[in-house]
Image (cartoon, grey):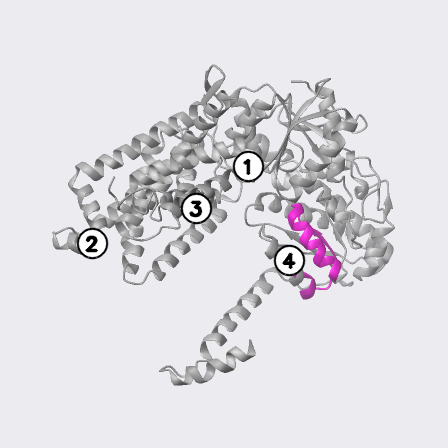
Amino acid sequence: MFETIVQAVINGLLIGGIYALVSIGVTLIFGVVKIVNFAQGEFVMLGMYISFYLATRFGLDPILSLVVTMPALFVVGVVIQHLLIRRVLGPNDMPQIFLTFALSLLLLNLALMLFTANYRTVHTSYSDTAFHLGGLYIPVAKLIAFILAMGLSGALWLFLHTTDLGRAMRAASQNRDVAMLMGINPNRVFAVAFGAALALAGAAGSLLMPFYSAYPFVGQTFVLMAFVAVVLGTLGNVLGALVASLMMGVAESLGIQFVGADSGLIVVFAMLLLTLAFKPNGLGRGRLRS
Amino acid sequence: MTKDRQDSIPRKTCGTRPIGSERPSRRRFILNGGAAIAAGAFGAVPLRGWAADPINIGALYPTTGSMAQIGVGCVAAAKLAVDMVNEAGGIKSLGGAKLNLIISDVQSDTTVTRTETDRLITGNKLSAVHGCYASALTLIASEVCERAKVPIITGSSSDQLNKGRRFTFTPFARASQFAKTQLQMAKLVSEQPKVAVIFENTAFGTSTSNGLKEQAAGEGVEIVMFEPYSAGFTDASPLINKVKASGANTLFSISYLNDLILIVRTVRQVGLNIAINGGSGGFVMPDFYKNVGEAAEGLQGVAHWNHDVSEDAQKVNAEFKKRTGEFAFEYAGGLVAQTFMLADALERAASADPQKVREALSTLDVSSGYAAMAPGGKVKFGPDGKNIYGRPVGVQWQKADLVSVFPKDDARAPLLKI
């Protein structure tokens, strides 16, 4: 029994690491640029397909393909911010919502056209292996994904707290007008934030590839959890999103184990509602603070 | 509705903007335009040069959305089947009339399935319909067909399709029969089978698993775990963790493709020594082996059709392979047989009228040719639209091929114990 619980917690933490990469991206964009990016999941999908093709065409290990997916999606993010998002930033929220939603539908249907609805998987030497400790097991691919996800989250935290650009980002997130008065160029800050968020989505795609199938709808599976984590961890709070993602992974896993295999999400949403009932702003405090 | 609208007019005239009938009418224009374009894209191709009027057969398959992968394969098979019938001279009693396939995309969505089936039937003179492969969608399409009195023939296995319906025909094994075959296969592997059943919680999974539960005791099989899950999960580990804790020696997984890939890979990761029977659905598709690779070797399943059940089936398989590069999966091969059943009914009805086609289908009785290309080799419909000879075939992945292993009459190779 004890072993089963420990195993369920391990499983939850491991998948929570992936949720974290997606949700940190969403919360970063919301915190800095003040828009909700509904297309975040589709960028995870894009990252997965890039990794898939690099692995099948060039034999590049999907995890190593991080070095391609992250910069590639960073550039995509900067371009999208510059050409699309920048133009709809204003007092009215509706164009922003429709823009990112349209982007999501566009990418999804483009993927269906280009890649078809087939499931694509990559087989690596470590895909089906696991570390066994007593009765417990830790799948190698997920462990690598988890460690790198935590590393990337930590790197983002350091970036936000120790670099000038990172501080500028936090300043812009706290009060855009005052930040501009202090000489911060919001367009530059927004572009970097959007790019960084998409780079994280790309990283999530690469890290998922060794153990998950790529298909056009794959992003939707993860983005739902990401949005819950973002709300649970307080909108715009990076550390909150990280903690909330891990909590949700564990809650889902324990829910499946002890409530029922179709109740994982019920437990997650019950946790969300309970949290919001007592802490309407989520678990975290302010925006982009930690 | 009307009252609301009348109220709103004076208020609008008071405003700064004049009464704008422009907005709703533009919207209506776009809607109409969209419908016209859609009708043009999917509608019947006008016939050229044929003496006899072509016979319209509706094909409802999800070619976009989450179920698109198999749906696209079904459409390829439907086209192949129609070509085969037409090349053999069409329907002779109707002056060699050709079959004309009208394909409609139901987008893997129950709401779209309802409107598309309606649109297909009202917009075209159909003699019969086939579809939709996924039971959840077929149940809806079947309801619409029943109301419109157009016969629908389907490979979907949900037993609900045989309840209180007159225009629905199911020539292949039912979900409840799949269960019996699966349980019997479990006894081939272990003398004391302890089975864990996990199933996706829609019509397909629940009906199949309930069949398993009801018949387990009668077959002498113990079920130690019985668990529904919601399809499309991100991680199979918690579920497999649960299976491990149950102490089962055989796992029945009733799943669509993506979930099953995750489940099998996770079982291998955990190092769990358990015989897996993937049942039907995603498991018996060519893509499964491509995705899972060698980990799929030795996995068992059940199908309502397999490409090696008869010589005719092997011929169809060769042609399908030439066209698509894959072997003919169960729905594809079954669809070819279904199209020949329709052709047989049309031939005897000597009419394209859907009601008469329905009568002819209800008296169908074949034991040779492509129409009889099913496990058991015979097709005759009972009053509930069920093929009274219908039975599933037990299959196993052996050396990258899906081989029929059970029952003895259909087996091409013995079951490998792993």
Q: Amino acid at mark 2?
A: Arg
Q: Residues within 10 Å of mark 1 (few under 14, many from 20)?
A: many
In magenta, the rendered stretch is B120-147
Name which quarter of the figure residue B226 lies in: top right
Q: Are marks 3 and 1 on the same chain?
A: no
Mark number displayed over residue A273: 3
Dot 1 falls on which chain? B
Residue type of the residue flagged with mark 1: Asn
Residue B71 is covered by the magenta coloring: no
The subunit carrying tag 3 is A
Q: Residues within 10 Å of mark 2 (few under 14, many from 20)?
A: many
Camera-near label (2 vs 3) is 3
Reading the image, the residue beneath label 1 is B258
Q: Is residue A135 above or below residue A227?
A: above
Disc assigned to residue B114: 4
- In the image, what residue type sits under mark 3? Leu
| Distance of label 2 from label 3 (alpha carbons) | 31 Å
Task: Say the numbered circle drawn on residue B414.
Answer: none
**Same chain for the residues at labels 3 and 4, yes or no?**
no
**Residue A286 image position (x, y, % from top left):** 26, 46
Q: Which mark is residue A176?
A: 2
Residue sitting nearer the eye, A133 or A64: A133
A261 and B42: which is toward the camera? A261
Residues at marks 3 and 1, CA–CA distance in whole angstroms: 30 Å
Q: Nearer the viewer, mark 3 or mark 4?
A: 3
